[in-house]
Image (cartoon, rainbow, N blue to C red):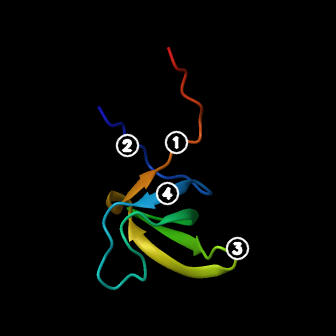
Amino acid sequence: MLNHRSPSLLDMIAVLSAPPDAPVEVGDVGTVVELLPPDAVEVEFLQRDGRTRCVATLPVADVLVLNRDRTPVS
């Protein structure tokens, strides 16, 4: 079962559903730079050279927080 959690500041996220007006695509990975109550986040997306490609406001329902914790392997 997939366990989604709410994004926190500086979390890495992946785009699950891209709004038509956003300059991002499904699968893009970015960093949460602002929490916008009640249910949106502002996310910075980078180019390969580390410069900002864009900053997009996305609904929390359209992003997946990427797990940065190590999961024990049995």
Question: Viewer-nearest of labels 2 and 3?
Answer: 3
Q: Which residue is mark 1?
A: 67
Q: Give the residue displayed 33% in from the left and 72% down from the top.
A: 18
Amino acid type for the residue under numbered disc 3: Gly
Going from N to C along the chain, the mark reached first, 2 or 1, is 2
Amino acid type for the residue under numbered disc 2: His
Give the SS element for disc 1: loop
Q: Which residue is mark 2?
A: 4
Can you tell which mark lies on residue 50?
Answer: 3
Q: Quadrant of residue 5?
A: top left
Q: Residues within 10 Å of mark 1 (few under 14, many from 20)?
A: few
**Looking at the image, do the residues carrying marks 2 and 3 touch, with CB atoms under 8 Å apart?**
no
Left or right of 33, for residue 23: left
* Distance CA(mark 4)–CA(mark 3): 17 Å
Going from N to C along the chain, the mark reached first, 1 or 4, is 4
* Distance CA(mark 2)–CA(mark 1): 10 Å
Q: How many marks?
A: 4
* Distance CA(mark 3)–CA(mark 1): 21 Å
Q: Quarter holding the N terminus? A: top left
* In-front residue for pair 67/27: 27
Amino acid type for the residue under numbered disc 1: Asn
Going from N to C along the chain, the mark reached first, 4 or 3, is 4
Question: Viewer-nearest of labels 4 and 3?
Answer: 3
* Distance CA(mark 4)–CA(mark 2): 11 Å
Q: Give the residue displayed 37% in from the left and 43% down from the top.
A: 4
